[in-house]
């Protein structure tokens, strides 16, 4: 049974979400003290976190940042606010998805199922390591390393990189990436993919690799290695 930590201070909404997820055989736990969210997260060790933006004491962005400094657990944001910067901010902080309230529970369930299937099943692939230029990519540990440095990736960033490298020197369409990552593109904002790719490229820049993930306007993305057929 997967455990979901639901960080939501609206008691009525918490109860409704918990009842729905319990009906789908998820174990749902909440927060007892919103001053110590990270401690309770560590104690519960959930498989997935659902977090509201507006919370007592500190907002969801703060706690997402704290959790990300400790863990790559999948995170879904919930928000009643409709400003696009909220979604951009959540993705920049390492969230896996963003759902605006009010939402349909079928959408929430579909997103949870897709994330859990992707995060906890993909590591069964036979190939765990891959080289790209002078770096080694560990798909299981979500890490890219060179002889002098290494970076940590989120699950989404690892899978984006994995998909691009498996088809290196070939354009991978945005639609293909969205479908591979989230299973059902109907529930995904196109901007969500853009934010994830930009965040991945920024991290790769720390190793001098960001330039090898190129954007092909109107087509998609390409990981280049060796002779670039588009030069």
Image: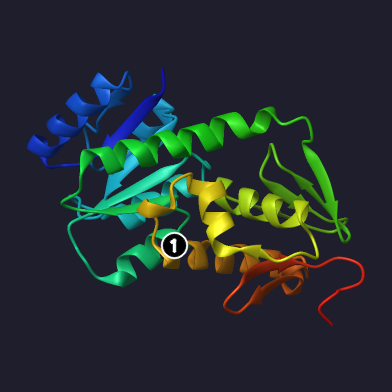
The image position of residue 198, as x and y in percent, is 57, 69
Q: In which quarter of the image is the N terminus?
A: top left
- SS at mark 1 in the image: helix
Please say whether residue 36 is visible from this viewpoint: no
Q: Looking at this view, is 148 or 6 the one in front? A: 6
- Count of marks, rendered view: 1
Q: Residue at x 38, y 24 (%)?
A: 3
The image position of residue 33, as x and y in percent, is 22, 36
Q: In this view, does 169 lie to the left or right of 35?
A: right
Q: In which quarter of the image is the C terminus?
A: bottom right
Q: In this view, does 152 lie to the left or right of 42?
A: right
Q: In this view, does 224 lie to the left or right of 60?
A: right
- Quarter where residue 202 is shown: bottom right
- Quarter where residue 164 is shown: bottom right
Q: In this view, does 75 lie above or below 146?
A: above
Q: Which residue is drawn at 66% across and 32% down?
A: 123
Q: Which residue is drawn at 61% across and 63% down?
A: 173
Please say whether residue 214 is visible from this viewpoint: yes
| Residue at far bottom of view | 231
| Residue at far left of view | 12
The residue to which callout 1 is attached is 192
The image position of residue 29, as x and y in percent, is 28, 26
């Amino acid at each position: 049974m997967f455990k979901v930590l639901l960080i939501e201070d609206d008691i009525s909404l918490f109860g409704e979400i918990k009842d729905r997820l319990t009906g789908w055989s998820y174990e749902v736990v909440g927060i007892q003290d919103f001053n110590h969210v990270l401690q309770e997260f560590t104690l519960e060790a959930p498989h997935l976190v659902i977090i509201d933006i507006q919370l007592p004491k500190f907002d969801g962005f703060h706690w997402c940042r704290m959790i990300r400094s400790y863990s790559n657990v999948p995170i879904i944001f919930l928000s009643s606010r409709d400003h696009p910067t909220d979604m951009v901010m959540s993705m920049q902080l390492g969230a896996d998805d963003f759902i605006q309230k009010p939402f349909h529970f079928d959408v929430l369930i579909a997103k949870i199922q897709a994330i859990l299937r992707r995060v906890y099943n993909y590591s069964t692939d036979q190939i765990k390591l891959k080289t790209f230029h002078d770096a080694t990519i560990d798909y299981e540990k979500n890490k890219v390393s060179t002889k002098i440095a290494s970076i940590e990736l989120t699950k989404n960033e690892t899978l984006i990189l994995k998909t691009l490298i498996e088809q290196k020197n070939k354009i991978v369409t945005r639609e293909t990436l969205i479908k591979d990552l989230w299973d059902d593109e109907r529930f995904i904002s196109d901007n969500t993919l853009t934010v994830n790719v930009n965040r991945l490229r920024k991290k790769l820049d720390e190793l001098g690799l960001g330039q090898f993930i190129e954007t092909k306007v109107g087509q998609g993305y390409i990981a280049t290695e060796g002779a670039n057929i588009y030069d």
